Image (cartoon, helix red, strand yellow):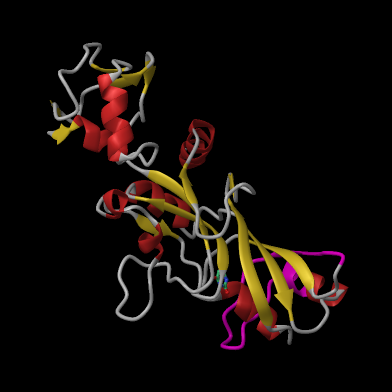
């Protein structure tokens, strides 16, 4: 059993204060009934609705974060601030973790959730979920680099990568790189193997999720119902 206001705030859509106000307004029903108040205890199987529409079909939290450089994609770190420090305190305690890491100096789209099974499926090497990165490199990117990535680059330690897409952009040291796997430092290592070290790396998309252009670095928002549905559709 969990407090109703706490449950609503854990979706990331409202602060605790906003959740309390929403409940008091009578717009939230629990199994079709108006609750007594924000502190009502609610069983896990109860159906919550807002204005008659089911609220967060399940009780997991899904947030899109625009990771800035300088924070680490983990839940704890002895030295550096983690991505969790960018969230309000009430969301730091909901067991959220990043799905697929970004290096400390990398930026862009990061999905945070406490839905372990979904994260597992998204990260499964068998699933080949596309990740799209914007890169800036030292040295101009060439059609040969494009071809090498399309064929599958062999990293300096001998690891063979699956075919990847490199789409050169107007500035010769910039490109979009799409990979289907998530090896450690993969984009940096693939381009280093081509003699084109990466200077800037920004993730723009992961599977059906694309970085919201309205979200400045360091900001986050809950996933929309449409984004959630797309993620769940990917699971089947
Ligand atoms: N590839 C990298 O090299 N670094 C990242 O953070 C993500 C992909």
Q: Could you tell me which quadrant the N terminus lies in?
A: top left
Quadrant of residue 166 in the image?
bottom right
The image shows residue 23 at horizontal and vertical percentages of 27, 23
- Evaluate whether residue 116 shows in this view: yes
**Seen in the image, is 54 located left or right of residue 103?**
left
Residue 226 or residue 183, whichever sits in front: 226
Indicate whether residue 33 is drawn in magenta. Answer: no
Residue 71 or residue 44, whichever sits in front: 71
- Evaluate whether residue 59 shows in this view: no
The image shows residue 103 at horizontal and vertical percentages of 50, 73
The image shows residue 42 at horizontal and vertical percentages of 16, 27
**Seen in the image, is 131 located left or right of residue 8?**
right
The prevailing secondary structure element of the residues shown in magenta is loop
Residue sitting at 56 percent across and 88 percent down? 157
The image shows residue 167 at horizontal and vertical percentages of 79, 63
Where is 131 relative to 4, above or below?
Answer: below
**Seen in the image, is 21 located left or right of residue 70?**
left
Residue sitting at 42 percent across and 67 percent down? 73
Residue sitting at 52 percent across and 71 percent down? 183
Q: Quadrant of ligand 1?
A: bottom right
Quadrant of residue 51 in the image?
top left
**Seen in the image, is 180 located left or right of residue 194?**
left
Residue 165 or residue 31, whichever sits in front: 31
Image label count: 0
Residue sitting at 46 percent across and 66 percent down? 101
Where is 193 relative to 111, above or below?
Answer: below
Indicate whether residue 149 is drawn in magenta. Answer: yes
Which region is colored magenta?
A: 148-170
């Amino acid at each position: 059993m969990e407090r109703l206001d706490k449950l609503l705030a854990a979706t990331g859509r409202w602060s605790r204060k906003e959740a309390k106000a929403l409940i008091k307004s009578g717009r939230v029903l629990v199994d079709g009934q108006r609750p007594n108040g924000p502190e009502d205890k609610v069983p896990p199987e109860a159906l919550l609705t807002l204005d008659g529409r089911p609220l967060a079909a399940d009780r997991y939290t899904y947030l899109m974060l625009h990771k800035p450089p300088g924070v680490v994609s983990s839940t704890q770190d002895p030295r550096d601030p983690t991505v969790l420090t960018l969230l309000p305190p009430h969301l730091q305690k909901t067991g959220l973790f990043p799905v697929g890491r970004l290096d400390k100096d990398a930026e862009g789209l990061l999905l945070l959730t406490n839905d372990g099974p979904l994260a597992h499926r998204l990260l499964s090497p068998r699933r080949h979920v596309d990740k799209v990165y914007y890169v800036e490199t030292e040295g101009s990117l060439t059609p040969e680099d494009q071809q090498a990535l399309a064929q599958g680059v062999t990293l300096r330690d001998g690891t063979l990568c699956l075919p990847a897409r490199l789409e050169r952009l107007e500035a010769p040291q910039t490109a979009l790189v799409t990979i289907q796997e998530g090896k450690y430092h993969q984009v940096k290592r693939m381009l280093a193997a081509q003699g084109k070290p990466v200077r800037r790396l920004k993730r723009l998309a992961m599977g059906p999720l694309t970085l919201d252009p309205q979200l400045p670095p360091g900001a986050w928002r809950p996933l929309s119902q449409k984004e959630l549905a797309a993620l769940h559709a990917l699971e089947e």
